[in-house]
Image (cartoon, helix red, strand yellow):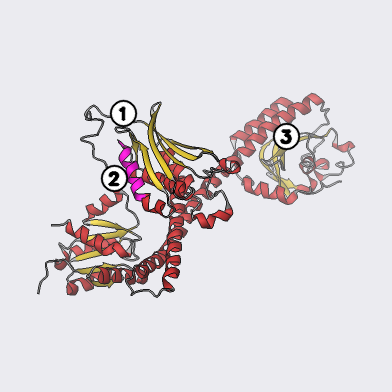
Amino acid sequence: MQSPLIPEDESLRLAALRELGILDTPSEERFDQITATVKLLFDAPIVLVSLVDEKRQWFKSRQGLDAFEIARDISFCGHTILGDDVFVVEDALQDPRFQDNPLVTGEPCIRFYAGAPLSGLNGLKLGTLCVIDRKPREFDQRMRAQLRGLAQWAERELNLAGEISLVAARIQLEKMKHEFISTVSHELRTPLTSILGSLALIAGGVAGTLPVQTRPLIEVAHRNAQRLTRLINDILDIDKIESGQMQFNLCAQELTPIVRQAIEANRSYAEQYGVEFVLAHELPGARSEVDSDRLNQVLANLLSNAAKFSPAKTEVTVVIERRQGSIRIAVSDRGPGIPPEFRSRIFQKFSQSDASDTRQKGGTGLGLSIAKALVEQMKGSIGFDSSPQSGTTFFVDLPEARAPELAKNNGRGIGKIDDHP
Amino acid sequence: MTDSTPNRVLYVEDEPDIQTIAQIALETIGGFTVRTCSSGHEALSAAPGFAPDCILLDVMMPGMDGPSTLAALRMLPVCADVPVIFITAKVQPAEVAHYKALGALDVIAKPFDPMTLAATVRKILGTCS
């Protein structure tokens, strides 16, 4: 008797079988339907869906056999999983590999066997669909093809469970990731708050006048503590957006005041770079349904990027214009433009155009990906045009909200309370 | 001797370092008299003796959290009408409305800027009659 060899990928095979979580589970109608159909089609006494485990083959579905499992070393199916195609033994008594096999010489008295291997999602052979008879049979190409086709049905059912649990596992993993990010960020925030507060007080002179040499060092520490805080806030923001936990207070409102406010808020930042913001074109009465805080956040990112990448003493131009049913807010700088190799990943997390620039430019690398996510939540889109000759323009397009009938007063919304501070 | 300007602040926060920063910020810059407490329980025992004009409550504290502390403080005669301000990282409009519905006058965002904390507190207190 020849016991089936152990295949080379046995440990991977066993791992895949475990993951499937199918061994020793109760029989299910969807598999019994397969074996019943095969039994009818081939008019055979025994049909099995078997899974080949380390030391046994276990039957998920059986027709015509009482046993739930059989030792692997005397199994036929153990041989089937070694190959890619249907394995046939037309007369076991004539086959030196099987003629003294206890399953042949004794119960269930196997004379004929035809088994098709069943593969898991990654191509590893997990078990078989097999047909067994107590008398020898011929099994021609047509029958092999039929068995192959039916085996595909069995494979689909087998891997269904695997696919479902993969999806469930992925969902679970995402959830754990969000919880982890949230927890870690909050833990990091607490000591950072103390560091930041302490440095703010010292830098503010509350603890006494600082010696000349101490001042710049305190300012370095303060700036970087602020930077760390921004990074943690950005990470938390992105995580909240991705896990669907960020709340948006959408309200149809005029965009011009929000743009003006964002320009004001970021003016002193731009002054550090010798850059001035100019609102070159407004659109009174242009309204959209937005969350004003979040839009502010988006504009702050675009404005600060524009300032950072502008040559000193240049202007960053902001324009509000109407374009076919949407309102566009465009921020243009006269900087060096976005390098071609960076353009496709500019909205991705932690992408910054030049690693060597990172520390100088001081961003978190998350600003644009947050901006994109926020704009999209407000049913808008974000994009850019860039060239080394003319600089870069980032634009946000938001769907226009028609003014209500009441507000017919130069397009200014009366009776509408804006909810920004 | 009574001073009509609110000056006595009871500050409830479990993190000792944040207590230190807030105390300096409120006393040195704002001229407030500050009593810090590390828990809701400590606040309940300190409040009658301290007679605060204003209570600053951290929301997230182990044991009694901010809202529970508020509810308990309101049962003390000396604190029944004292303005309370919550300090919390959650400052979305819906969350602020929730805290105000619990009885707080307003909410200050955490982390706060120690250089402006006192002014913010004065501004909020100025809005209550």
Please tell me which residue lies in front, B69 or A407.
A407
Q: Main secondary structure of the magenta part?
A: helix
Residue A365 shows in the view? yes
Q: Residues within 10 Å of mark 3 (few under 14, many from 20)?
A: many
In the rendered structure, which disc, 1 or 3, sits on the residue that comes first in sequence?
3
Residue interval drawn in magenta: A253-265
Q: Residue at x 19, y 73 (%)?
A: B50
The residue at the far left in this view is B1
Q: Residue at x 21, y 56 (%)?
A: B103
Q: Amino acid at mark 1?
A: Arg
Please tell me which residue lies in front, A226 or A375.
A226
In the rendered structure, which disc, 2 or 1, sits on the residue that comes first in sequence?
1
Q: Residues within 10 Å of mark 1 (few under 14, many from 20)?
A: some
Indicate the secondary structure of the residue bearing disc 2. Answer: loop
- In the rendered image, residues at marks 2 and 1 fall on the same chain: yes
The residue beneath circle 3 is A46
The residue beneath circle 2 is A420
Name the mark on residue A118: none
Q: Quadrant of residue A412?
A: top left
Image coordinates for residue B49, horizontal then vertical, percent: 18, 75
Image coordinates for residue B126, horizontal then vertical, percent: 17, 58
Residue A257 is one of the magenta-drawn residues = yes
Q: Residues within 10 Å of mark 2 (few under 14, many from 20)?
A: few
Image coordinates for residue A331, horizontal then vertical, percent: 43, 40
Q: Amino acid at mark 3?
A: Ile
Please tell me which residue lies in front, A353 or B36.
A353
Q: Residue at x 44, y 74 (%)?
A: A213
Name the mark on residue A402: 1
Indicate the secondary structure of the residue bearing disc 3. Answer: strand
Marks 3 and 2 close (CB-CB < 8 Å): no
Q: Is residue A199 above or below residue A235?
A: below
Chain identifier of the residue bearing label 1 in the image: A
